[in-house]
Image (cartoon, rainbow, N blue to C red):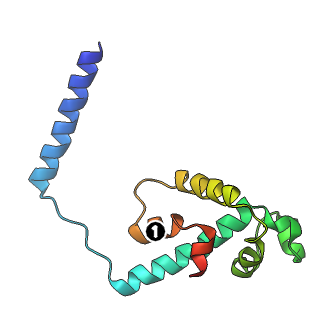
Amino acid sequence: MAVKNTERKNSQNFAVLSAMLKAGLKPKPKLKPVEHARRLAVEKALQQRRYCDAFALWRTCPHKACRRQRRCGGDATDCLRRALDRVPHPLQWRARQDILEAPPRNIGAPERAARQCMPRDLFE
């Protein structure tokens, strides 16, 4: 039974590849440097907010809106910068690993680069 399933998957893979060859494989266009930098900056800002939420910094936030929403709703850059000395490195590492496991495998290069940053790397 396992051999038939393997053969069927191989034939399906072959059919897909042959259809792609007939259609003509076209490489994805590279991003222009300006677009790459823009997407990287946007994703870094989102990454800072993800870290703030992962460390539950909203619990000690002076903004009432953050505590009410139970998530970062203010300036994530300042909040994360203030909290980095208080958050232990193993917790930072675990949060990074959790964030890396969450996205789809087909995200773009700028987004992947931002998600691989540790919290301190987002300020450099």
Query: In the image, residue 87 lies at what x, y percent?
Result: 75, 64
Q: Quadrant of residue 79?
A: bottom right
Neighbourhood count class around disc 1 (C-alpha, 10 Å): few under 14, some 14–19, many 20 upward = few
Considering every residue shown, the one lying at the far top of the view is 1
Query: In the image, residue 106 lies at what x, y percent?
Result: 40, 57
Query: In the image, residue 12 lies at what x, y percent?
Result: 22, 34
Direction from residue 41 to residue 95 in the image, left or right: right
- Determine the residue positioned at 79% across, 67% down: 86
- Determine the residue positioned at 39% across, 68% down: 109
- Determine the residue positioned at 16% across, 51% down: 20
In the image, is residue 69 above or below residue 35?
above
Q: Which residue is mark 1?
A: 113
- Determine the residue positioned at 54% across, 68% down: 117
Asked which secondary structure carries label 1, the reply is: helix
In the image, is residue 77 above or below residue 2?
below
Disc tally is 1
Q: Quadrant of residue 3?
A: top left
Question: Which one is nearer the viewer's eye here, 117 or 2?
Answer: 117
Direction from residue 1 to residue 14 in the image, left or right: left
Direction from residue 26 to residue 118 in the image, left or right: right
Considering every residue shown, the one lying at the far left of the view is 22
Q: Quadrant of the C terminus?
A: bottom right
Query: In the image, residue 102 lies at what x, y percent?
Result: 55, 52
Q: Quadrant of the N terminus?
A: top left
Q: Amino acid at mark 1?
A: Ala
Question: Which one is nearer the viewer's eye here, 90 or 113?
Answer: 90
